[in-house]
Structures are given as C-alpha cells and as structure tokens.
Image (tube, rainbow, N blue to C red):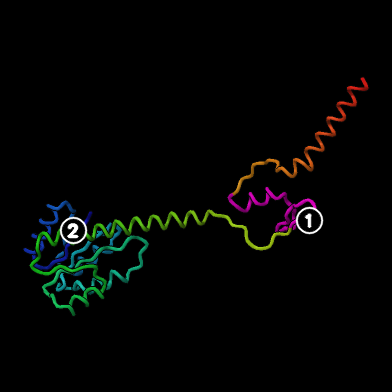
Amino acid sequence: MKVLIAEDDPVSRRVLAATLGKFGYEVVAAADGAEAWAALQRDDAPSIAILDWMMPELDGVEICRRVRALPTTTTPPYLILLTAKSGKEDVVIGLDAGANDYLTKPFDRAELRARVQVGAQVLELQANLATRVRELEAALSEVKQLQGLLPICSYCKKIRDEQNHWHRVESYISEHAEVEFSHGICPTCYTDVVQPHLNQLESRENYKTRKT
C-alpha cells in the first residue's frame, strides 16, 4: 500500500520514510503542503497520508479539508495528522477538518505502525463494502418486477399488455419477470379434463375393436 508523508523537516521526513519502508509500505514523500495536495489529486494518489500539521504553503488541517471536499467515486484516502499539539481542542479541530486519526510528535515506531495498520484495515473494509454495493446495484438493475393491475381475460386467461395486445399468461410473465415455466397438470384438471378425454378415447377404441 502506498503512503504519503508530508513533512517539511527533512530529518523527520527521512525517518518516517525509512520506518514505513521497513514496515513494507511504498512511500511517497512531500516537503510541503502544496506537494502533498498535488500528490493527493493524482489518479494514483496514495491510500494513506501522514500530514504534518504545520507546513509551508498548506498546513495539514487545510489539506484534510480540501481532500474531503473532493468529489470522488473511489475510496477516499485515510488521513493521519502528525502534530506536536496534543490538546483536546486541537485534536477536535483536526478531526473536524476530515482527519481520520492523529499521531503526536515525536512519534513512537510501534504507535506509527499500529495507526497505519488501522488505516489499511479501514480502507480494505470500505473497498469491500463499495464492491458489495456495486454488486447489489447491478443485481437490482437486472431484477424485473410485475406491479399494478393486469387486465386478464375471464375466459382464456390471456393478459393484455400496454399496446393492447393479448398474450398467454406464461409468455407475459416470462417477459416481465425473472421466471421460467415448466408445464404440468394439476389434480383437478386431470380429473375434470384429462381423465374424461382419456375415457372418451378408450371408448372409441373399444367401439372400433367390437365393430371389427
């Protein structure tokens, strides 16, 4: 996973980059807020950004605001503010601006790793959820539903469509719903229709046999 480090202090930037590199992340470094903002607008923008609160050009809080204002159809980046400020009011300001988390200076390696891992897990969950939503939307778009009042003939049971054409029930429903028909004979029809017909055929055969 690609991680952006936006830190104007070169020593801190190198330490962060080396530490995250050892953790297995691909690192993109920015020396000021303008570089970080440009990196986050690219098509291949990093999925996680560690933004120093105080930077030239743009500070970390302003970058968070701008990122959250971007229209996007993809999973938004996970933003971590890096700051020497640890007061509750400062933390609230950062979170209100759109930061997902924060890390205080000087940072602890274990805490850095844990917070970045949390970000990676959140992004994975969001991506999986977005995939499921797209699959559900695609499935719903393919579902056909029959709604409203259907005009049906009282005698032959054909259904009239919007163009005033009459269709067999199974043909109409197959065209308007995800349904396929298999034909059979219910017990009532067998008794009332099929059995008398068979009896009639049998009587005819017996009559021919006797006549010959």
Is residue 14 shown in magenta?
no
| Vertical arrangement, residue 166 with respect to residue 192, above or below | below
Q: Residues within 10 Å of mark 1 (few under 14, many from 20)?
A: few
Which label's residue is closer to the chain start, 2 or 1? 2
| Vertical arrangement, residue 91 with respect to residue 35, above or below | below
Which numbered dot is residue 28? 2
SS at badge 2: strand
Q: Residue farthest to the bottom?
A: 89
SS at badge 1: loop
Q: Which residues are magenta?
A: 152-178
Which quadrant holds residue 90?
bottom left
Indicate which label's residue lies in the foreground, 2 or 1.
Answer: 1
Which numbered dot is residue 58? none
Q: Residue farthest to the right?
A: 211
Residue 97, position as x, y percentages in the image: 25, 74
Is residue 174 shown in magenta?
yes
Horizontal side of 130 relative to 100 (left or right) equals: right
Q: Nearer the viewer, residue 151 or 9?
A: 151
